[in-house]
Amino acid sequence: MRETVFILDFGSQYTQLIARRVRHLGVYCEIAPHETPWAELSVHQPRALVLTGGPSSVMEADAPRLDEAALAAGVPVLGICYGMQLLADGLGGRVAGAGGREYGPAVLEVDVETPLFDRLPGALRVWMSHGDQVVEPPPGFQVLAHTANCAVAAMGHPGRRIYGVQFHPEVVHTLRGTEILRNFLFGVAGCKGGWSMADFIEEAVSRIREQVGAGRAIIGLSGGVDSAVTAALMDRAIGERAVSIFVDNGLLRQGEREDVRRFFRKKYPLNLRVVDASEQFLEALRGVTDPEEKRLTIGRLFVEVFREEAGRLGEVGFLAQGTLYPDVIESRAAHGGPTAHIKSHHNVGGLPGDLDFELVEPLRNLFKDEVRELGRELGLPGEILSRQPFPGPGLAVRIIGEVTPERLGVLRRADLCVQEELEKQRSLYEEVWQSFAVLLPVKTVGVMGDGRTYANVVALRIVSSTDGMTSDWVRVPYEILGRISNRIINEVHGVNRVVYDISPKPPSTIEWE
Ligand code: XMP
């Protein structure tokens, strides 16, 4: 049985980070909702449990708890922040309000020798973020460390291998945090490690084979990283029975359809169908100016095209998509109730559920950087793995107002100038999450040669981000901005003005619609 650690999520903003750290240490882990019954977890014979922090207080009646059977099972446990308070409260210790939130750096002083702080100095810089704290550890537990404001900053029961820390070892501000996690996993829980992306591939492949059986699957290939990696995995698992479908919706960047076709026919051959549905999409978008109506129209058409294509292929029972862990969390909106509806996201990797297929989602426990690593392991080259995200509705959400073939032409040419100029700046390009042009429904007066012009305005959007949830505009050197602007104004007929968008997200969003 594979060595597995479960991270029970109590709503911490750092849950993903804990998972990433554990996997980087070579131990496979999965995040599970805190209320997951022990019976469900124990099937996997977990090596350890990590209880995350969270926004609640154990002193509230409806505070999130864990299945008590998990603590009685003899499995090593590390409780972090709220997780530690939960351990204290559940095992007979005492938790109290700390008289205000403690947020920020603190110096941890280690009081006793313990495997948890093995090979670490007696004083450690740690990161605190809590309201309550443990004031009395449960019977049998030792106080392992304290800080100036927190008498029980770490506690442990070596015999039961249950530990708790009030600070956050997973964040970079806790300077030796990864070593603390390593001590817990290897020193306390006896993990062996050695898990890698190569193991992931093997497991994912056998899971896909098990799920799909002798059936067939289609994959919505957008040419982006997530769908490309999904398609490569499906290809490895079921070969010809996986059909990747690339839909040209007429809203793609310059040369995109040909690039994707060439790549997945010649360089990394997949069972690929390229469908030209551009006329259908542009026809449906005629006269549509409202952003949500655009998105919904495009989403609906994607579904239609997929259904049609699947019908042509005969019996297809499965749809594989590149859902990542952050997508899972977002759609679960686990903590804090339903999220506000900002935009109806659509892409070939996020099709509405009314397609009659069973979903295959081999990447649903991974983060973007892990997917890139997986892609490398699968032999996908950098030209695919370093691609910028591109929204499913494509250029339609970058043309403010009506989408027409003429306006698409203008935007494509302007966009190409942005790409070409940025690609010349490799180090800058790597810092950039997305870079693109937006065509505004505004005309302004200009002068070209001796004549007056009255033409379109293009906005440049160049942002940095780690997950698309928040972002900032990139401080692109003026010279490069100048070069992009000159090229667009000189080369793109119908544009006489270029502006740079300097809005962070939030409160703006990355795409303009
Ligand atoms: P926003 O505009 O919401 O975008 O700040 C955040 C990230 O998501 C991308 N995006 C989409 N991706 N389908 C997608 O697959 C969509 O409908 C969609 N809309 C926005 C956007 O490019 C950015 O990376």
Image: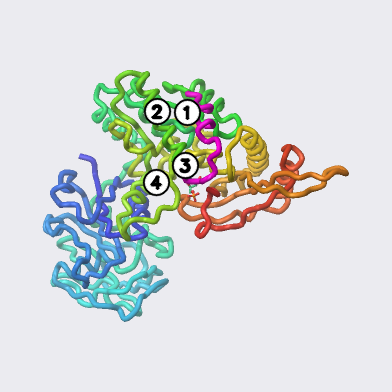
Whether residues under marks 1 and 2 lie with C-beta atoms below 8 angstroms apart, the answer is yes
Question: What are the residue bounds of the magenta stretch?
Answer: 275-292
Other-residue count near label 2 (Cα within 10 Å), few / some / many at <14 / 14–19 / ≥20: many
Describe residue 394's horizontal placement relative to residue 37 as left or right: right
Q: Quadrant of the N terminus?
A: top left
Cα gap from disc 1 to disc 3, whole angstroms: 16 Å
Determine the image quadrant of residue 435: top right
Q: Which residue is mark 3?
A: 295
Q: Nearer the viewer, mark 1 or mark 3?
A: 3
Identified at 64% across, 46% down, the residue is 441
Cα gap from disc 1 to disc 4, whole angstroms: 25 Å
Q: Which residue is mark 2?
A: 306
Residue 377 seen in the figure? no
Q: Which residue is mark 1?
A: 247
Whether residues under marks 3 and 2 lie with C-beta atoms below 8 angstroms apart, the answer is no
Q: Which residue is mark 4?
A: 367
